[in-house]
Amino acid sequence: MKLKAVILVGGPEKGTRFRPLSLHLPKPLFPIAGFPLIHHHIEACCKVEEICEVLLIGSFQANDALKRFISREKKLFQKPINYLQEYSMLGTAGCIYHFRDVISNGQPDAFFLMHSDAYCDFPLKELIDFKEKFMPYLMMTVKLPKDQTLHYGCAGINNATNEIVHYRDKPASFVSRDINAGVFLLDFSIFETIGAHFQSKLTRNMSFSGLEEDSMDKMNRHNRISFESEVLPKLAGTGKLFAYRINRFWLSIKSAGSALYANRAILDSYRLKHPELLTEQDNCRGNVYIHPTAEVDPTALIGPNVTVAAGVIIGQGVRVRNSIILDAVELKNHSCILNSIIGWHCVVGEWARVEGTPTELNPDAPNATTDSFYLFDKHGKLLPSTTILGRDVRVPAEVVIRNSIVMPHKELHRGFQNQIIL
Amino acid sequence: MKALILVGGYGTRLRPLTLNVPKPLVEFGNKPIMLHQIEALVEAGVTTVILAVSYMSNVLEEKLEQHAKRLGIQILYSHEEEPLGTAGPLALAKKYLLVGDNPEPFFVLNSDVISDYPFSRLLEFHRGHGKEGTICVAKVEEPSKYGVVVYDQENGQIQRFVEKPQEFISNKINAGMYIFNPSVLNRIEPRPMSIEKEVFPFMANAGELFCMELEDFWMDIGQPKDFLRGMCMYLTSLRKRSPEALHKGSNIVGNVLIDESVKIGENCKIGPNVVLGPGVVIADGVRIKRCTVMRDAKIKSHSWLESCIIGWESRVGQWARLENVTVLGQDVNVQDEIYLNGVRILPHKSISASVPEPQIIM
């Protein structure tokens, strides 16, 4: 069997909830547990023999960071990996339709479609085994607590046949606990479906004279087709769309809080899959990844659930727990970093305390997301969450930065709590 | 000479410290508050100190006995069965105050006040004008919290008092330290009476009340915030009067008073304005500013403390951050990496979660 993998990586207009971390770096390249986010997706794909090519589709400029990343991955996995850039926003269905020739090139039998936001221990082989001839389109689903389902695509599934009989994207009221987990295995006939939908949309829109808008806007509306809100609902109940339910850990990485949580989960997975990546030394506790070029003083205490990137300098008596420390950060003596993401090149002064609030899982709902979808509570107060320091922020000695988000290149002169600092 | 110290009640404002220890015995600058006062009185010629008490008086009696012997003075106790206010206790202690053929003027002190205690100068000034009473006045920055005194700048004769004024009248307030002739006792009955409202105004009208301005420092340390302010003032005054009492070192900043039994680790930065009591252990990499750490408390490594009072035998964990007038009672255990902001913690509590907003933990 010959397969391809398509990973949708989005663009600068997307992933805004990941700001300020995504202001200078495409979110898919954001390092989690020592590697860019989509490295984990690409690794899962490359482990599957049947997959002969991995295609990344997005609207980011193919800049240096992205190019270097892709060439490194190609070398590492010895598989063709290519980036296809959308020059206008085509939507999640529109973009794969646009590149259908590239995807179909080589006559593969089917292709995986993956969202870069979705993270789990991708069961790609299981999906291949589960897909039958009579299941042209297979969607991976996961069960979430009722109140969280409203933020995702909800699927009504026939328990006997696993057919998806109903599908609503981000419904206004409860539809189903099974949600779209962002991984599909699709026959190429999907392009006919999308094409037909595109045509009907075109003719429908042509019938409006569109006096107010100019033709550019009209064209944009036509071209943008969303897989979740336009294609899937149509496929539901036609006997073609089926669900593969997973019962394992799954996370949607939308915000910094979920990045920290994914960090923890991925570090945990290294215990089994890549124990050589974990750092075991006297000043570490639990799962810790420390890049070989980082300098960590022996009197510091790192972990559990900490990732320390390249060129980081950690001084005497520093405490880091449940945090991601990005490249070239300097943590001065006796500082304390808890539940935070410290951006590239930040400097944290002596005895300073940078602390976020850990977003903990509800233990009764194993796949509950850690994300709060709202930044502020009903009184306009910033909800407690992960503290994020953007790139090149300087925190003076002895202050406390708690539950706050600091924009890049900011030099702070005092402590802050529960604030966004521009 | 004799002195009466109004010890009074429960010291509720200094809780949680005063839950285990009567307020006069709480150490201020590594010495019980009361002892600062008694030693200053002895220097001015006082040989008998009468304590007007109501709460935990037996603890007081026990602890003060050794000091009485050492100083060669007599300490007597006047027990209030019911709270008698600020004047009533004088009438109750009458029998002690009038002992002897020719009763001399006696001092009266509020037990909460710390100062350089210029009792000799007060006695001299009092004898100088020959009237019935002299009170000390202190200059403060926020006078409306107290009772303000209006007086003749030339001779110190008091004209009137205004309690908690609504407009600015004066920035001199009643400092809670007095000297009276025994005849004052005729103005007071052994019932709850306020000296500010029921005695002083009459004395002032009769031209019998004078005041002397305090020149060095003064503070009412009845609550933690003021306790710490008073501590800073006291240390500043120590720097002037006996700088050898203060500590020096590469890890010391500003005025720091450290008992000789204290152990301090490496890479610490202590001060300014820190008092460390006997048996205190400070581990490596600790930063302390503007704090009093009581006897046998332990501060673990890399923590950061500012404006706190750490109670006797308490333990503060590693990488902890305590600030904003956080007060730990006796034997409180704060675990590693905890953040406490303006928190008062009652004795024997163990804290395992941060408290980022001011609160009381029972």
Image: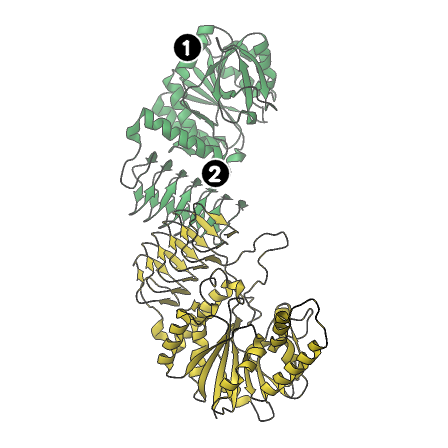
Chain colours: A yellow, B green
The image position of residue A175, as x and y in percent, is 68, 74
Are marks 1 and 2 in one subunit?
Answer: yes
Question: Looking at the rendering, in which quadrant would you find the N terminus of chain B?
Answer: top left
How much space separates mark 1 and mark 2, taking CA atoms? 37 Å
Residue type at mark 2: give it: Leu
Is residue A107 positioned above or below B183 on the image? Answer: below
Q: Which residue is mark 2?
A: B17
B291 in relation to B166, above or below: below
Front-most of A403 and B36?
Answer: A403
Between residues B266 and A2, which one lies in front from this camera angle?
A2
Left or right of A74 in this view: A358: right
What residue is shown with label 1?
B124
Q: SS at mark 1?
A: helix
State which chain disc 2 sits on. B
Up-down: is B169 above or below B360?
above
**Residue A361: horizontal and vertical position, in percent?**
54, 66
Crowding near the residue tagged with mark 1, few <14, some 14–19, many ≥20 C-alpha atoms within 10 Å = few
